[in-house]
Image (spheres, rainbow, N blue to C red):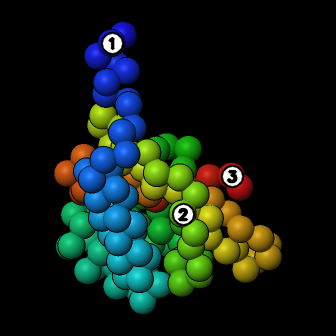
Amino acid sequence: MKEEIEVYKLVPDINYRQSLQVADREARIIMRLISEGKFDELKREYDVKFEVKDGKIDFDVPKNNTPFPIEWASNFMYIGNFIKGPDSIDISYFIYNPTHDRSEIIYMTFDNDMKFQFIYVGDA
């Protein structure tokens, strides 16, 4: 239990703040590539697998994930949460959904080496 507490302890140190800044920067670059339709560049630069169909990007990870609507990628994003865990780094954003005129929440997951994994569309 002591080891678990140490792993999950979020100490406001330079590494935590630096991880937040790097994750936010990468997330915004990824969104720019999506909004500009640079899908081949996204696949090449981030070595990530996905399919584009019906105006959405489907990462197919996790299995219950809803495909991410491309039209959202160019909208304002506000950080909702940041979690630096033992196996991954997750950053969530509130992002505007023009279809429903409301904000949605999305999660971007990176591994601990900042390798982008997927975008998870969640509930606001």
Q: Which residue is located at x 43 percent, y 45 percent?
A: 83
Q: Which residue is mark 2?
A: 79
Q: Position of residue 35 (x, y in %)?
A: 47, 84
Q: Which residue is mark 1?
A: 2
Q: Which residue is mark 3?
A: 123
Q: Which residue is located at x 24 percent, y 57 percent?
A: 115
Q: Amino acid at mark 2?
A: Ile
Residue 13 vs residue 22, the one in the foreground: 13
Residue 17 vs residue 102, the one in the foreground: 17
Which mark lies nearer to you, 2 or 1?
1
Local secondary structure at mark 1: helix
Residue 9 vs residue 79, the one in the foreground: 9
In three-dimensional space, the C-alpha distance between marks 1 and 3, rounded to whole angstroms, equals 33 Å
Q: Amino acid at mark 3?
A: Asp
95 shown above or below 92 = below
Of mark 1 and mark 3, the one earlier in the sequence is 1
Local secondary structure at mark 2: strand
Mark 2 neighbour density, 10 Å: few (under 14) some (14–19) many (20 or more): some
Q: Which residue is located at x 37 percent, y 82 percent?
A: 33
Of mark 3 and mark 2, the one earlier in the sequence is 2
Local secondary structure at mark 3: loop
Q: Quadrant of residue 48?
A: bottom left
